[in-house]
């Protein structure tokens, strides 16, 4: 099952996406500029092989819900995210607010 819901943070609207799979969930919250995602995101791939796409993204591990994703510290971020001031260790919510 796929669940897509609007998510309001500090007056900005994001889209939260949950893909329910056997034994795991894929979690994403996105803006028009970038996104944060669960541990399934391959930041190294985005930074190395897909660097020409300049993807703004962050990865949090050990999260099971969208709320977890918003409050967990990001484990890694893309180089493009760093250029916006988004850093590993920052909460998902704080990172998203830099993507508006």
Image (cartoon, rainbow, N blue to C red):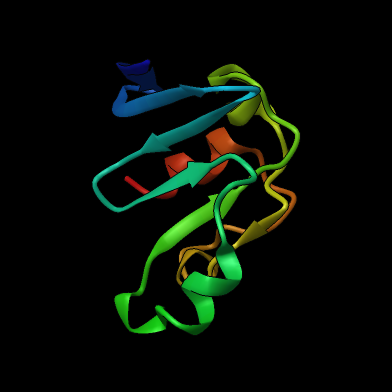
Q: Quadrant of residue 67?
A: top right
Q: Horizontal and vertical percent for residue 44?
A: 60, 72
| Residue 48: % across, % down | 52, 83
Question: In the displayed structure, would residue 28 be above or below residue 32?
Answer: above
From the viewer's perspective, tell me whether residue 69 is left or right of residue 99: right
Residue at 51% x, 32% y is 26
Q: Is 69 left, or right, of 1 in this rendering?
A: right
Q: Residue at x 44, y 40 (%)?
A: 97
Quadrant into which the C terminus falls: top left
Tell me residue 80's x, y (percent).
45, 71
Q: Work out which quarter of the rendered image holds the N terminus and state it.
A: top left
Residue shown at the point (59%, 39%) measured from the top left: 38
Residue 52 point in image, percent of width and height: 33, 84
The residue under the point 29% across, 53% down is 33
Q: Nearer the viewer, residue 70 or 64?
A: 64
Residue ranking furthest to the left: 32
Is residue 70 something that shows in the picture?
Answer: yes
Q: Foreground: 64 or 67?
A: 64
89 lies above or below 92:
below
């Amino acid at each position: 099952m796929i669940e897509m819901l609007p998510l309001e943070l500090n007056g900005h609207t994001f889209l939260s996406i949950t893909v329910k799979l056997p034994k795991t969930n894929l979690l994403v919250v996105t803006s028009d500029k970038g996104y944060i995602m669960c541990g399934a995101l391959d930041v190294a791939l985005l930074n190395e092989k897909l660097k020409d796409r300049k993807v703004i993204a962050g990865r949090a591990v050990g999260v099971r819900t969208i709320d977890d994703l918003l409050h967990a510290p990001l484990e890694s971020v893309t180089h493009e995210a760093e250029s916006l001031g988004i850093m590993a260790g920052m909460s998902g919510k704080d990172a998203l607010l830099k993507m508006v």
